[in-house]
C-alpha cells in the first residue's frame, strides 16, 4: 500500500512539474509562425540570426515601423512596460507604498508631461512613424496579452501611445545627467570639512582644462539625511555612464577605408540591457545597430553610407536651488520680493491601498522637491535643460542620412543630454562633434546648490550649434572619445564632469603610427585589458611605499609583483588585484579621517571627480595625508605604506592564503546580470545570471568599473553593445550585445550573447546565417 501511495505521489509531482514546464514555455517567443496584422499594406519579413537579432524588410516605412514595434514587444515587452511606468511615476502601483516618494519625484520632474508636449509639436512625418511603431506594440499586446513577468507584478494590459515611447527614451536620457548627485556629494563634503579643504575635491581636471569652483554658502545640511536621499532614490538622481568610441581614417587602414568602433558602457548589472540589436530596411532606408528598447531609431550603428557611435559628454545640465518658501502663503522669495508658487495635483495608485493625492509646487518651471528632500530642513528645487526642449528627430535624420552633410544636419535637430559623436563614412571622412543640448551656462555655477533667493536659473538657452566642439578629418587621421574633455580653451563654460584621460590614451597608443589597422585589430582594441595608468601607479609605489628587511616576505613578494607587472588586467593576474586594492585603500586612508568612512567611500567611487584630484594631492603632498585622528604628522609615504600593507592583509584574508601569486584578479573581480525580479529570493536563481570572473578595470578599454573600496569588486559599468564598422568600401559590421535579445529566462536567447560577449566574440552581420523567419501579413 505504501509503495502505491509513493508511486501516486511521484506521478503527481511529475505531472505538476511537466505542467509547470509546459506553462512556462508558453512565455517563449515564437520566431517562426506568421502573424496576421490587418493594418499592414503588404507583407513584412522578419529574419533572425543565431542570436535572434532581427532583420526586418518592408515595402513601406509605415509597415517597417509597425513591425519594429511588434518585434521589440516580442522580445522586451516587460522591460518596455516597466520603464514607461517608472517614467510615468507609477512605481507604487506594482511595487507598493514605500516607492511613493520616488513617484512624486518622477511626476514632479514631469517626464510623461514633457513627452506629451513633445508629441504635440512633433514633425507630422515622424509622428506618423512613431504611431505605427506603437501600433505594432499594441498589436502584439492584443494578440498575446500581458506576459508572465507583468502578471507577477500585477501590471494590467494598457495600450501604448507615442508619448510612452518618448518617456522610455527620456528615462535613459535623464540617467545620463549625473551632476545632480555630484552637487549633493560636494555639499556633504563642504559641510563636513569646510570650503577651503572641500574645494580641493571638487571637479578637478589636470592642467590645460578649464575649471571653476562655485561658492554659494548657506546653512549646513545633515550628512546622514543627504546620504539617505542618495540611497533611496538611487539611479533616479542620475547614474554614472561611460563609453568608448573612435574612428580611423583611410590613411591608417589596411583596406584604405574608414573604420568606426563604438561601445556604449551602460550596464549597471542589468538583465536585459537597455539596448537591443536590430536591422531594418524599407526602400532606401536601411539601418543596423543598437537601439534603446522602446525607441524606434538606432543610437549607434550604420547605414549604407555612414557609421556612428556616441559617448556621454558630461556637461552639467541639472542644477539644484535652495528656496526660501512661505508655506502658509504658498510663496517663494526672489530678489527680496515674494511670488506665488505654481501648484499641480497628482493622484497616485498604490498597490494594496487607497489612491493618494499629493500636490507638487513650482518656482516658475522648477519643481520644489520637498517630498524628495523631506528631512533636510530646507526646500530644494530642481532645474534641468530638458525643461527647455526635447527633440529626438535628429536620430531619424541621422539614420536616413546619405552623406556627412545630411548626417550632421540631422544631428543639429537633437535636443537631449549632450553626447560625444564619432562618425565615419564610405567617402573616407571621419569626425567628432558634440550633439544634444549644451546650456549657455553662467560662469562658475553648477557645482554646489545655488541660492534661489538671488538666482532663478544658471543658464540662458543653448550654446549656438555652430560653436559646438568638433573636428573633421584631422591631420593625425583618427578621432577618439572616452568621456574625456572635448576641447582645450573652449570659450563657453560647461562645468563638465570628464573622465580621466587614461582610456583615451589606451586607444591612442594602439592607433598612433599604425598604418595597417583592420577590423580584427579594432576587436582586440575594444577588448584590450591594458592600462596606461599602471606605470603611474608603479611610480607612486616605488616612491612612497617603504618596506624594509623586517617586513613579511609575502609583503615583499606582492611589492615585486606589482612593480614587475606589465599593466595587463587579465583574469589570472595577481598584480592587478594588488594594484586595484592599493589604489582604493590609498585613497580611502587619505580621506576617511576627514570625511568619515561612508562619505570617503562614496567620493572615491566617483572617479571622474576624485581620481585626478587624488593624484594631484599626492603630487603636492597635501595636508589631507596627515591623519587628523593621530598626534603624529603623517606624510604621503606613511599613508601609502599603510595602504599597501592593509591591501595585502585584505587580499590574504579574502583569498584565505598569504601567497600573493594566487591572488587572481578574476576571483575577486566579477560581473553579474540581475533582473528586476531578482529582488525576490524565489525568482533570483531563475532570472539572474552570474556572477562571472571579469578582466579589466575602470581605466581599461574593456571597461569594468567597480565601486567598492575593499574586495570583492563588482563591475557595474561595462560595454553594452560592441560595434565595429569597416568601410571596404561597403560597410562590413561586427557586433555583440552584453545581454541577450530576449528577456524571458527560459529563452536560450536570454543570455547567449552574454556568453559570447564574455568570450570577446563578435558576429558578422553579413555572414551570420538566418535561423528564424516569420512574416507579418495584412
Image (cartoon, rainbow, N blue to C red):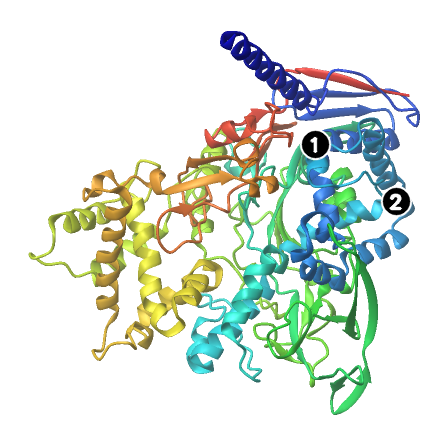
The percent position of residue 461, horizontal first and vertical second, equals 75, 69
Locate residue 588 relative to residue 88 in the image: left or right: left
Please provide percent x and percent y for residue 725: 60, 33
Give the percent coordinates (x, y) of residue 492: 63, 70
Q: Which residue is mark 2?
A: 127
Asked whether, in this view, residue 502 is left or right of residue 174, the answer is left
Residue 456 in which image quadrant: bottom right
| Alpha carbon separation for disc pair 2 and 1 | 31 Å
Q: Which mark is residue 148?
A: 1
Which residue shows up at 72% across the image and 25% down it?
55
**Residue farthest to the front?**
1
Secondary element type, mark 1: helix
Q: Residue at the spot x=58%, y=60% of the render?
A: 232
Badge 2 local density, few (<14 within 10 Å), some, or many (20+)?
A: some
Quadrant of the rendered image containing residue 299:
top right
| Residue 547 placement, left or right of 758 | left
Q: Is residue 262 visible?
A: no
Q: Earlier in the sequence, mark 2 or mark 1?
A: 2
- Residue 258 versus residue 773: which sits nearer the camera? 773
> Residue 523's mark?
none
Amino acid at each position: 500500500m505504501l509503495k502505491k501511495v509513493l508511486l501516486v505521489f511521484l506521478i503527481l509531482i511529475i505531472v505538476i512539474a511537466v505542467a509547470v514546464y509546459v506553462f512556462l514555455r508558453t512565455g517563449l517567443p515564437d520566431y517562426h509562425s506568421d502573424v496576421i496584422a490587418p493594418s499592414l499594406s503588404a507583407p513584412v519579413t522578419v529574419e533572425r540570426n543565431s542570436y535572434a537579432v532581427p532583420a526586418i524588410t518592408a515595402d513601406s516605412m509605415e509597415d517597417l515601423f509597425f513591425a519594429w514595434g511588434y518585434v521589440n514587444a516580442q522580445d522586451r515587452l516587460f522591460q518596455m512596460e516597466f520603464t514607461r511606468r517608472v517614467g510615468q511615476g507609477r512605481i507604487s502601483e506594482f511595487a507598493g507604498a514605500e516607492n511613493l516618494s520616488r513617484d512624486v519625484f518622477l511626476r514632479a520632474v514631469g517626464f510623461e508631461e514633457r513627452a506629451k508636449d513633445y508629441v504635440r509639436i512633433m514633425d507630422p512625418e515622424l509622428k506618423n512613424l512613431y504611431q505605427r511603431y506603437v501600433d505594432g506594440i499594441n498589436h502584439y499586446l492584443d494578440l498575446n496579452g500581458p506576459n508572465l513577468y507583468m502578471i507577477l507584478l500585477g501590471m494590467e494590459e494598457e495600450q501604448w501611445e507615442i508619448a510612452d515611447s518618448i518617456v522610455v527614451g527620456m528615462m535613459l536620457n535623464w540617467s545620463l545627467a549625473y551632476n545632480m548627485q555630484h552637487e549633493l556629494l560636494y555639499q556633504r563634503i563642504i559641510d563636513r570639512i569646510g570650503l577651503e579643504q572641500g574645494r580641493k575635491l571638487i571637479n578637478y581636471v589636470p592642467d590645460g582644462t578649464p575649471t571653476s569652483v562655485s561658492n554659494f554658502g548657506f546653512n549646513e545640511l545633515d550628512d546622514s539625511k543627504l546620504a539617505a536621499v542618495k540611497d533611496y532614490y538611487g539611479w533616479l538622481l542620475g547614474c554614472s555612464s561611460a563609453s568608448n568610441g573612435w574612428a580611423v581614417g583611410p590613411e591608417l587602414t589596411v583596406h584604405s577605408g574608414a573604420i568606426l568602433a563604438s561601445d556604449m558602457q551602460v550596464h549597471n548589472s542589468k538583465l536585459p540591457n537597455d539596448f537591443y540589436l536590430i536591422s531594418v530596411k524599407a526602400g532606401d532606408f536601411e539601418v543596423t545597430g543598437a537601439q534603446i528598447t522602446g525607441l524606434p531609431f538606432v543610437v549607434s550603428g550604420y547605414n549604407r553610407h555612414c557609421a556612428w557611435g556616441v559617448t556621454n559628454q558630461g556637461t552639467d545640465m541639472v542644477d539644484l536651488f535652495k528656496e526660501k518658501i512661505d508655506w502658509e502663503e504658498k510663496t517663494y522669495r526672489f530678489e527680496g520680493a515674494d511670488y506665488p508658487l505654481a501648484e499641480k495635483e497628482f493622484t497616485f495608485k498604490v498597490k494594496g491601498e487607497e489612491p493618494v493625492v499629493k500636490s507638487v509646487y513650482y518656482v516658475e518651471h522648477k519643481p520644489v522637491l520637498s517630498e524628495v528632500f523631506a528631512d533636510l530642513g530646507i526646500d530644494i528645487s530642481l532645474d534641468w535643460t530638458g525643461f527647455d526642449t526635447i527633440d529626438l528627430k535628429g536620430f531619424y535624420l541621422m539614420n536616413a542620412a546619405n552623406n556627412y552633410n545630411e548626417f550632421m544636419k540631422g544631428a543639429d535637430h537633437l535636443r537631449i543630454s549632450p553626447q560625444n559623436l564619432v562618425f565615419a563614412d564610405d567617402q573616407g571622412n571621419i569626425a567628432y562633434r558634440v550633439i544634444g543640448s549644451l546650456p549657455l551656462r553662467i560662469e562658475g555655477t553648477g557645482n554646489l546648490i545655488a541660492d534661489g533667493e538671488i538666482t532663478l536659473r544658471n543658464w540662458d538657452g543653448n550654446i549656438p550649434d555652430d560653436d559646438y566642439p568638433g573636428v573633421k578629418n584631422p591631420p593625425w587621421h583618427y578621432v577618439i572619445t572616452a568621456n574625456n574633455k572635448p576641447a582645450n580653451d573652449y570659450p563657453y563654460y560647461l562645468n563638465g564632469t570628464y573622465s580621466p584621460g587614461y582610456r583615451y590614451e589606451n586607444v591612442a597608443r594602439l592607433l598612433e603610427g599604425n598604418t595597417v589597422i583592420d577590423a580584427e585589430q579594432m576587436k582586440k582594441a575594444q577588448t584590450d585589458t591594458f592600462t596606461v595608468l599602471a606605470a603611474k601607479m608603479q611610480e607612486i609605489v616605488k616612491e612612497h611605499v617603504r618596506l624594509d628587511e623586517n617586513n613579511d616576505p609575502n609583503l615583499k613578494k606582492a611589492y615585486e609583483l606589482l612593480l614587475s607587472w606589465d599593466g595587463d588586467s587579465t583574469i589570472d593576474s595577481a598584480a592587478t588585484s594588488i594594484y586595484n586594492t592599493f589604489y582604493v585603500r590609498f585613497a580611502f586612508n587619505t580621506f576617511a579621517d576627514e570625511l568619515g568612512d561612508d562619505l570617503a567611500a562614496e567620493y572615491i567611487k566617483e572617479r571622474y571627480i576624485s581620481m585626478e584630484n587624488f593624484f594631484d594631492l599626492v603630487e603636492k603632498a597635501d595636508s589631507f595625508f596627515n591623519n587628523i585622528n593621530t598626534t603624529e604628522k603623517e606624510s604621503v609615504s606613511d599613508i601609502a605604506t599603510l595602504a599597501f600593507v592593509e591591501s595585502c592583509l585584505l587580499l590574504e584574508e579574502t583569498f584565505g592564503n598569504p601567497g600573493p601569486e594566487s591572488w587572481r584578479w578574476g576571483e575577486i573581480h566579477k560581473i553579474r546580470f540581475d533582473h528586476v525580479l531578482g529582488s525576490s529570493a524565489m525568482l533570483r536563481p531563475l532570472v539572474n545570471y552570474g556572477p562571472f570572473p571579469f578582466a579589466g578595470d575602470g581605466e581599461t578599454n574593456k571597461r569594468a568599473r567597480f565601486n567598492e573600496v575593499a574586495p570583492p569588486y563588482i563591475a557595474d559599468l561595462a560595454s553594452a553593445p560592441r560595434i565595429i564598422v569597416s568601410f571596404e568600401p561597403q560597410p562590413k559590421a561586427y557586433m555583440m550585445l552584453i545581454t541577450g535579445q530576449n528577456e524571458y529566462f527560459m529563452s536560450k536567447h536570454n543570455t547567449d550573447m552574454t556568453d559570447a560577449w564574455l568570450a570577446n566574440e563578435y558576429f558578422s552581420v553579413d555572414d551570420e546565417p538566418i535561423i528564424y523567419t516569420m512574416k507579418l501579413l495584412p
